Amino acid sequence: MALKKVVRRIGVFSCGKILAALYAAFGLLAGAMFSIFSLFGAVLGAGAEGFPSPILGMFFGVGAILILPVMYGIMGFIGGALTALIYNGVAGIAGGLEIDFD
């Protein structure tokens, strides 16, 4: 027997916090990948003539690990809060989202 519930409202701050945490985790993953590719490119280009110092690649890599999670987290919070606000407005007109639970 399935139990049906209707989601009529989503907490704006709650949704923002959850999506901020999720997006920050994605940002950490993206920053780590960017860091690896940046350092790999610095190592490959270190011997090339006219190539800037490999230290520059290291700063891009470390910066990506620090900056991307923060930027992704902020954007996740803003996006989550806006999504919850829009959902609450639409759910007031359309009646909400029906979910079945067992």
Image (tube, rainbow, N blue to C red):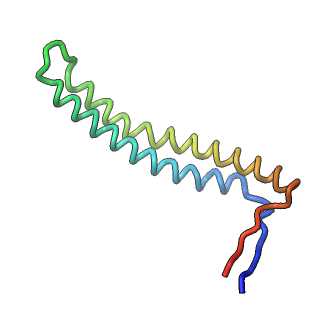
Residue under the point 22% across and 26% down: 55
- Relative to 37, residue 80 above or below: below
Q: Position of residue 14 (x, y in %)?
A: 66, 57
- Relative to 97, residue 30 above or below: above
User: Which quadrant would residue 38 be assigned to in this image?
Assistant: top left
User: Which quadrant would residue 98 be assigned to in this image?
Assistant: bottom right
> Which residue extends farthest bottom?
1
Q: Position of residue 99 (x, y in %)?
A: 72, 70
**Left or right: 100 as drawn, with respect to 33:** right
Quarter occupied by the C terminus: bottom right
- Relative to 43, residue 18 above or below: below
**Left or right: 21 as drawn, with respect to 36:** right
Residue under the point 26% across and 31% down: 58
> Which residue extends farthest top?
50
**Left or right: 3 as drawn, with respect to 34:** right
Quarter occupied by the N terminus: bottom right
Q: Position of residue 8 (x, y in %)?
A: 80, 62
Residue under the point 43% across and 37% down: 67
- Front-most of 95 and 13? 95
Circle count: 0
> Which residue extends farthest left?
47
> Which residue extends farthest front?
1
**Left or right: 23 as drawn, with respect to 36:** right
Q: Position of residue 77 (x, y in %)?
A: 61, 46
